[in-house]
Image (spheres, rainbow, N blue to C red):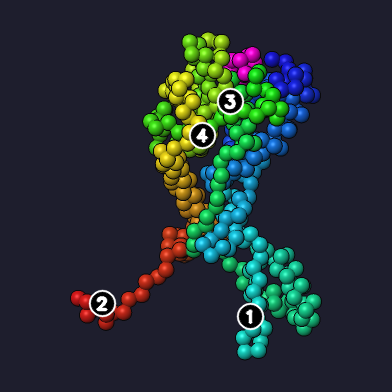
Amino acid sequence: MNNCYLCDEFLTSETESKEHILLNSIGGRLKSKELLCKTCNSKFGHEADGELARQLAFLSSYLQIKRESGNNPIIKDAKTQDGKGYNIVDGSKPVLAKPRFEKKIENGETKYSIAARNEKELINILKGLRKKHPELDLELAKEKFQWQEKYLDEPLTHNITIGGDLAFKSIVKTAVNYYIHTQKDIEQVEHLFPYLKGETDLKIGKHFYPTKPIYKKESNEVVHLIHLVGIKHSKQLYCFIEFFSAYSFLVHLSDNYKGENISTTYCYDILQNKELNKQVTLKLKVEEIAEIYKMTKNDFEIITEKLNRVMGIANKKQVDNEIGNITKKAIDKVFDKYKHEPVVTEQMINEFSHEVANAYVRFAFRGQKRKSFDKTDEQDKE
């Protein structure tokens, strides 16, 4: 193909674009320069692809997916049970969404409590206070301020919504891209181009959760998968798409398919960063495709199970990463202190062990309150 399939512009080194068939924002590696021009790619990137990327941002970030370009975004609007707002940075680090400021009057004395995210933010708040209280000593206030880094001792909640017209347009584009990329043909899907360009409205994409597994998953595997099926005798052309081994969709590309039988799959392990060979079993009848558009209670149960599995893998990865961070911080702190020592001494080893043990206990027992027991009561019970 030498033309953009949406606007028909001739693709040259100046007009071609690197179209990610699976979004770069979710760790996609499958791409082509023979699909869309820069203009069409940019339009989709800002609109439909941008919306789907936003909806999938939490899992991308929490799994710490490596993208080909750019960093994982900051996840906003996470909240504690009492409504305190946090942003999640680097996939795991919660930081205050905004500084906290409290004013209290005790025994006729005004006291201010400030929680700032950095020194610059603190100084700006203190300067604002000094306008009302010229007697405020900024340097003294800064000296009394204590910087702490500690584990959040309560869970955060973050709402995720997957779907909507824009997001489904991006999902349909993924299916169309994959068909054109693998089959080198636009004839069987060109009736969908007006929909992709926003000229018509179609309902051809839907959440789809098969009641039985259609391919084998390994225990710690998280993948993006595209499976394209063309059935000559029933004239059906459809595409199964799964993100993060959790969210899955069916795109009904055509019910007047005139090509040969197709069954082709692309699967990419986003944690191991490698393409996998998967045998997918999915052959739907015409009436089964029609039924897919009716969401059932069973679908919610399946996606809950899938998400629990993926979050379990993500949590383990987070724990492993934090244990690695604990070790690295202890090495940096202790061995920097003794950087002029020619050999590793017993004192260095003891201090290193102490740092690791204390940090690990704080991490392992985060969010748990200490229990105290009255010895007399315990003896009476015995």
CA–CA distance in space, label 4 to label 3:
14 Å
CA–CA distance in space, label 3 to label 2:
66 Å
What is the three-letter code of the residue carrying label 3? Ala
What is the three-letter code of the residue carrying label 4? His
Disc 3 crowd rating (10 Å Cα; few below 14, some 14-19, many 20+) is many
Label 4 close to label 3 by CB (< 8 Å): no
Q: Residue 49's quadrant in the figure?
A: top right
Dot 3 falls on a residue whose secondary structure is helix
How far from the left and from the top, in percent, is residue 79?
56, 58
Residue occupying image coordinates x 47% and y 36%: 295
Over which residues does the magenta segment extend?
A: 180-189
Dot 4 falls on a residue whose secondary structure is strand
The answer to whether 32 appears left or right of 291 in the picture is right
Which numbered disc, 4 or 2, marks the residue that appears first in the sequence?
A: 4
CA–CA distance in space, label 2 to label 1:
41 Å
Which numbered disc, 3 or 1, marks the residue that appears first in the sequence?
A: 1
Disc 2 crowd rating (10 Å Cα; few below 14, some 14-19, many 20+) is few
Q: Residue furthest left?
A: 382
Image position of 123 with respect to 276: above or below: below
CA–CA distance in space, label 1 to label 4:
51 Å
Residue occupying image coordinates x 78% and y 79%: 132
Residue annotated with mark 4: 207
Residue 378's mark? Answer: 2
The N terminus, quarter of image: top right
CA–CA distance in space, label 3 to label 1:
59 Å
Point out the frontmost of discs 4 and 2.
4
Q: Is residue 183 magenta?
A: yes
The C terminus, quarter of image: bottom left
Classified by dominant secondary structure, the portion drawn in magenta counts as: loop
Residue occupying image coordinates x 63% and y 80%: 104
